[in-house]
Image (cartoon, rainbow, N blue to C red):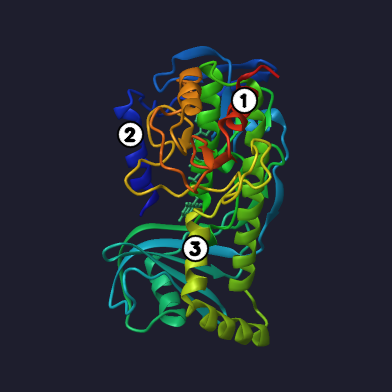
Amino acid sequence: MPQSETERLLEERLIRQGISVEREVEATRIVPDSTGADVVLVRPDGRKEDVRAEWLIGCDGAHSTVRHVLAIPFAGETLRSDWFLADVHMSGYPRPDTDASIYWHEEGVLLIFPIQAGRYRIISDLPATAGSTPPTPTLDQVQQLVNKRGPAGTKLNDPVWLSGFRINGRKVASYRQDHTFLAGDAAHIHSPAGGQGMNTGMQDAINLGWKLALVIRGDADKALLDSYSPERSAVGDAVLKAAERLTAVATICNPVAQRLRNLAGHLALGLTHFTRGVAETMSEVDVHYPNSPLNGPHHGGLVPGARVAPVEGYPSAGSGPRPLFVLFGARDPGVEQLLKMYPDLIDGNVRPALQDDVISLVRPDGYLACSASDIEAVSAYLDRLTSPS
Ligand SMILES: Cc1cc2nc3c(=O)[nH]c(=O)nc-3n(C[C@H](O)[C@H](O)[C@H](O)COP(=O)(O)OP(=O)(O)OC[C@H]3O[C@@H](n4cnc5c(N)ncnc54)[C@H](O)[C@@H]3O)c2cc1C
């Protein structure tokens, strides 16, 4: 699905919740401090607005002003090769519209991803040129490269987007400083080989969103926010490493190593188990938080920090407009009492147990918070979450 379509759907959902996105409003001055931030906003007509915010989220992209103001290093490297990306229409392409394909040629790699009926994304590497940005390719140049590296008889037309880019792998060490957070490309950028940039950024926002909402509403202690950076930084590290690995394998130059890679690739990509693993990694449904400071007690089955897949017939945790924890387990008097104690923290709709005789508490973002044989352990977990530290 094209990123513009994802953005349209998200914006429509925001509008349905009564929130509008104010485009072309620029934060020209940002002064964060230990309790919030002073920000100057400039509107499209030039009007200025001074804002004092208790919390600030820098989701302002790879060149993040917020990151620069905080002087947080964006450590990493830029690869010494040029790449291009072309969203085009194609005819005569021999592969089904459901398959992504990698073409390994001795001069470089060519990747073809179907986007919509007849529309594809082509990514390929080229020898590095001088200058800070690689040139934008023409449709003719892309066609020549497809002729050389890709399937025969494929005809490109109607380009939607052509661009040249360099691959950066960079990340901040900490996603938070006092009352200011970083999320998305402001915190991590990497090779688009795995197509995970936007997903990773959206998961940052989901992870931070429910925690900030509970803290602002007074339903959880501020300490809840301490888990944002360790949880998401670990995911950022893993995504960067996977993208680096994929890029390194795709751009091997040594002819012997190329032959070995091609053979191993053919074998592995023919295995359903392997391709399912790749799909789970790329879609990020395999993301989990095994070392999170938020993980509570464990009693059999899924371990805290694991993702709880949506249960058929029940909406997934976090799918409602308010962030709520969800209980899975028997509806005994202890559970009723807990629901009464925390009506703004736990969904009143208790789901059937994930495992016999186990009470599981699932976070608003769908990850297991804790599991126990008795409700007291769950209650103690929630007491810790809500009591001032
Ligand atoms: C060539 C290429 C291909 C890609 N392909 C994929 C893909 O297939 N799948 C995928 O998931 N990801 C892909 N990505 C990555 C994806 O585009 C990014 O990860 C994603 O857009 C990051 O979102 P973001 O909101 O963090 O940052 P951005 O999309 O950069 O948004 C930041 C926003 O902040 C605004 N802003 C910046 N400074 C200020 C300021 N001072 N005041 C106000 N506003 C400001 C900007 O105008 C912008 O609207 C690709 C990226 C590239 C370059």
Q: Are marks 3 and 1 in contact (CB under 8 Å)?
A: no
For label 3, count other residues whose C-alpha is less than 10 Å away and answer few (under 14), some (14-19) or many (20+).
many
Labels 2 and 1: the sequence-earlier one: 2
Asked whether disc 3 touches disc 2, contact meaning CB atoms under 8 Å apart, the reply is no
Judged left or right of residue 77, residue 187 is left
Element under label 1?
A: helix
Quadrant where the C terminus lies?
top right
- Relative placement, left or right, of 47 versus 89 is right
Q: Mark 3 points at which residue?
A: 84
Q: What element carries label 3?
A: strand
Q: Which mark is residue 385?
A: 1
**In the rendered image, the vertical position of residue 215 relative to residue 174, given as above or below:** above
Q: Which mark is residue 61?
A: none
Q: What residue type is labelled 3?
A: Phe
For residue 249, what is the image quadrant? Answer: bottom right
Which residue: 56% across, 83% down? 262
User: Which of the two labelled residues, at mark 3 and mark 1, occupies the earlier sequence position?
Assistant: 3
Q: Position of residue 383 (x, y in %)?
A: 62, 22
Q: How far apart are marks 2 and 1 (CA)?
A: 29 Å
Q: Which residue is drawn at 39% across and 48% down?
A: 311
> Pointer 2: what residue?
13
